[in-house]
Image (cartoon, rainbow, N blue to C red):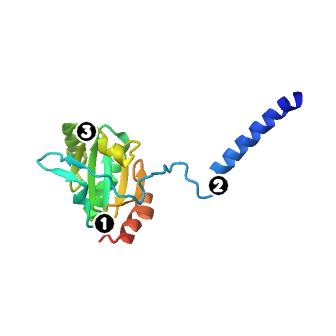
Amino acid sequence: MRRLIALLPVGFFLILAAYFAWSLRPGYDPHALPSAMIDREAPAFDLPTLGGPGTLARDALLGQPTVVNFFASWCVPCRIEHPLLMHLATQGKIRLYGIAYKDKPEDSARFLTQFGDPYKAIGMDRDGRTGLDFGVYGVPETYVLDAAGHIRKRFVGPLSEAAVNKELLPLLRQLGSP
């Protein structure tokens, strides 16, 4: 019995060492959150648009590769990524739609007035149901949809210039984006 108790710390150490070795393996990104939605059809949605009559529906996004960005006026990281989205929109490099996640229309409108509006259209997901269907953990999150409406990539957190240049734009070119 004493021998077993003496080996307990050694066993604990080996388990801990194996965990760290697994976490530090090449190519492992601890920030990457897996998504069960990759290569699946984007969830159906039909959201009221910000600032006007009409709706933003998934079917409106079909036909060419599209980027869908979940954001909110109360989200600090959204403010960090917003200048990059504005730059991409002015360059005409992406077809970008926004979904205001759990936000009030007046707050979203004020945010976009203050920082600029890079989106072709904005759907209001006031109750967060569409975000839940997509698997959103928190904002900002960005999804790349192919022309058929299948989710091909998910970016968690604010987009960086490196992620845009190394992953987003090459993927859009591969998917046939103009």
- Residue sitting at x 35%, y 43%: 132
In space, the residues marked 3 and 2 are separated at their CA atoms by: 40 Å
Which type of secondary structure does the marked residue at label 1 adopt? loop
Is residue 47 among the parts visible in the rendering?
A: yes
Residues at discs 3 and 2 in contact (Cβ within 8 Å): no
- Specify which label sits upstream in the sequence, 3 or 2: 2
Q: Amino acid at mark 3?
A: Arg
Establish if 67 lies above or below 112: below
Q: Residue 40, image x and y in percent?
A: 39, 58
- Residue sitting at x 41%, y 54%: 37
**Residue 126, labelled with which disc?**
3
In space, the residues marked 1 and 2 are separated at their CA atoms by: 35 Å
Q: Nearer the viewer, mark 3 or mark 2?
A: 3
Res. 175 image quadrant? bottom left
- Specify which label sits upstream in the sequence, 1 or 2: 2
Is residue 160 among the parts visible in the rendering?
A: no
Question: Furthest-left residue in view?
Answer: 53
Query: Which residue was labeled with disc 2?
Result: 25
Residue nearer the viewer, 162 or 47: 47
Which type of secondary structure does the marked residue at label 2 adopt? loop
Quarter of the image for the N terminus: give it.
top right
Q: Amino acid at mark 2?
A: Arg
Crowd around label 1: few <14 · some 14–19 · many ≥20 (10 Å): some
Residue nearer the viewer, 127 or 155: 127
- Specify which label sits upstream in the sequence, 3 or 1: 3
Query: Which residue was labeled with disc 1?
Result: 147
Q: Residue 157, image x and y in percent?
A: 41, 47
- Residue sitting at x 72%, y 41%: 15
Establish if 46 lies above or below 91: above
**Residue 157, labelled with which disc?**
none
Crowd around label 2: few <14 · some 14–19 · many ≥20 (10 Å): few
Res. 109 image quadrant? top left
